[in-house]
Image (cartoon, rainbow, N blue to C red):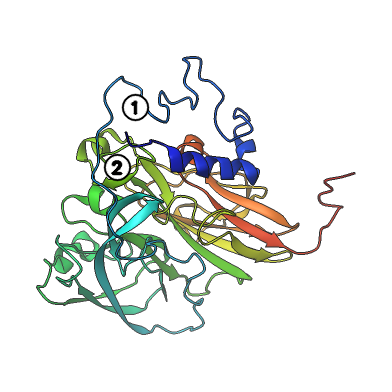
Amino acid sequence: MTQLYHNRRRFLQAMGATGAVAIAGCLGSDGEQENDGNGNENGNGNDAGDAGGNGDEVQSLPPAEDVDVDTIAADPTDVPDPVDWDEPRRHEWTLKTIEAVAEIEPGVTTTFMTYEGQIPGPMFRCRVGDTVHLTFDVPDEHNVDLHNVDFHAVYGPGGGAVDTTVAPGDGEVEIEFKTTYPGAHIYHCAPGNHDQHISLGMFGTILVEPEGGLPEVDRELYIGQHELYLNGDTGQEGHHTFDFEEAASEDPTYVLFNGEVGRFTADGAAGPIHAEVGETVRVFWCNGGPNLTSGPHPIGNVWSEWYRDGDVLSEPAQYIEGTAAPAGTTAFGTMEMQVPGPIHLVDHALSRVNRKGLLATIDVEGEPDEEIFNPDP
């Protein structure tokens, strides 16, 4: 029988090794809950060789497929440069859709739907009053479904979705729009089965900076949270497909940053994200959803400024430990890096961290400051 939860347990153990297990205070030293009172080791009604909590047989899956790409996860440091112009500009942007098989974790694959082969889609950046000419393509060699793009920063039918709906191989389409209001906004696919396309990766951020721009920071990062609703269990090896019933019940198989379990952690394939003591770091947190509200929280730090719902005109909230970011929004905040050590980015709905794979780590390097934090007084 396929071994369930094997890779997920390795991930949870790695979390424990990096100290993230302390967020819950109820886990054993190996990163698993010791007992849920019903004789189950991991507290969710499952064990490594049994079915999911209801006595049903485990649904068998076909073997994991050969991947089309090594990773589907976007690089969190790939952020466009801040606006440095003070008059409206015209931009020529292109956006292409790519459906691709990739690993969620070792031995677990699904067919993702993406913009430009990455999750989240590329971040676009402009200034209020700018004009954007967008060329959108759904090439038949990379797609089997029709796609489009709905920009929340656009006045127009479906945020542009009506006029960008394209079937594979139908050729490029072009639209033009003016960015008339500032803010950090999401964009996503909206072809009818919105939940499927967004869940599988078709969402991203367009940042429309105000006329005066945003305050300068030392480093910017961009991450995308989303849920996967799949026909197998969490950690079950094999090839998973989208499950519409699970999506309707809003019970995700995984909740992830950038389409992959723990990629940006000490034990992840890419390792933690780098920052340095003394820096101010801005994090754009794009919650694609398609359903769940996120609770952005940095373990070991706070949001010294938090721009709720991507609002760039109001004064930001200050020194926020955690907050709420509804599905379909991009919010962002800054952190002051005062001392070295790991900062874990989590959704404070912590079962998504402990059970569903949502974790990223910023490794802050530099000299200690024992006046701020002394681990051995």
Instruction: Decide if residue 228 is in sight here.
Output: yes
| Residue to which mark 1 is pinned | 52
Tell me what residue is drawn at x 18 percent, y 65 percent.
143
**Does residue 255 lie above or below 81 as drawn?**
above
Tell me what residue is drawn at x 33 percent, y 35 percent.
251
Residue 144's x, y, as percent? Answer: 14, 62
Q: Is residue 346 left or right of residue 217?
A: left
Indicate the quadrant where residue 88 lies: bottom left
Tell me what residue is drawn at x 51 percent, y 82 percent.
84
- What's under tag 2, amino acid-wise? Tyr
Going by the picture, which residue comes out furthest to the right? 377
Name the element at disc 2: loop
Indicate the quadrant where residue 71 lies: bottom left
Q: In which quarter of the image is the C terminus?
A: top right
Q: In which quarter of the image is the N terminus?
A: top left
- In the image, 195 versus 363, the foreground residue is 363
Tell me what residue is drawn at x 47 percent, y 46 percent.
358
- Single out the mark in the foreground, 2 or 1: 1
**Does residue 5 lie above or below 301 as drawn?**
above
Residue 35's x, y, as percent? Answer: 53, 20
Residue 276's x, y, as percent? Answer: 69, 66
Name the element at disc 1: loop
Residue 66's x, y, as percent? Answer: 29, 59
| Residue to which mark 2 is pinned | 229
Q: Is residue 328 left or right of residue 359?
A: left
Q: Given contact means CB atoms under 8 Å apart, are the residues at marks 2 and 1 in contact?
A: no
Query: N-terminal of the two: label 2 or label 1?
Result: 1
